[in-house]
Amino acid sequence: MGSRFLWLVALVLVPLYPAAAQRPDNPAPMADSVRNRIEEQFASRVQKELGLTNEQTAKLRATSQQFGGRRREMHTRQHQLGEALRAQLQPGVAANQDSVAKLTDAMVDLRLASAQSTRAEMKELSKFLNPVQRARLFVMRDRLRDRVKEAREHGGMRRGREDRDHRQDHERGTHEPHE
């Protein structure tokens, strides 16, 4: 459970890495270390769950590095565009129509680019993974992305874990009311 929590924390923080790395008070080497550990743990889990050979794992790692950097760049750009769009759409403030149109178009273009990147990555993966392995990897990534999104929406990792533990306790019938 501890390694899973570390994995989720890093996935929440890794997309913030480009902005954080520019701050002089932020230890970028630590972020790299955490990301590397998480990537190793995920690679091990994927290798085991998908039944990959060492050769497939090495190829997957290279492909993931190639496309992972691109995903992080797109995530950072999406965050920037979203912030700019939210700033334009503040209640009680007149939005600049031209700016809103450009930001909206950029968000749509970014989503298209993300889908095209995913398609290109799946095509590359088809060179060394069978269709079932690719699908399982796709599902594993989606589940992880959903968990990270849920954690962000529920006030961060700690609260997300507490909510999950509370749900699990309730499902097991061990739920105790909180005062």
Image: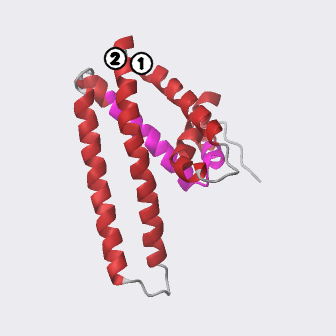
The residue type indicated by label 1 comes to Gln
Q: Is 27 or 141 nearer to us in this picture?
A: 27
| Location of residue 169 by image quarter | top right
Front-lying residue, 142 or 44: 44
- Mark 1, residue position: 47
On the picture, is 135 further left or further right than 95? left
Q: In the image, what residue type sits under mark 2?
A: Gln
Measured as percent of width and height from the top left, residue 176 is found at: 71, 43
Magenta residues, start to end: 136-163
- To which quarter of the image does residue 143 belong? top left
Q: Quadrant of the N terminus?
A: top right
Q: Position of residue 108 (x, y in %)?
A: 29, 62
* Side of 151 where 131 appears, left or right: left
Query: What residue do we see at 34% from left, 17% from top?
Result: 56
10 Å neighbourhood of mark 2: few (<14), some, or many (≥20)? Answer: some
Indicate whether residue 159 is drawn in magenta.
yes
Foreground mark, 2 or 1?
A: 2
Q: Which mark is residue 56?
A: 2
Mark 1 element type: helix
- Residue 166 at x, y = what percent? 63, 43
Q: Is residue 139 visible?
A: no
**Residue at the location (32% across, 64% down)?**
106
Q: Is residue 127 magenta?
A: no
Q: CA distance from mark 2 to mark 1?
A: 8 Å
Q: Residue at x 74, y 50 (%)?
A: 178
Principal secondary structure, stretch drawn in magenta: helix
Question: Upstream in the sequence, badge 2 or badge 1?
Answer: 1
* Local SS, label 2: helix
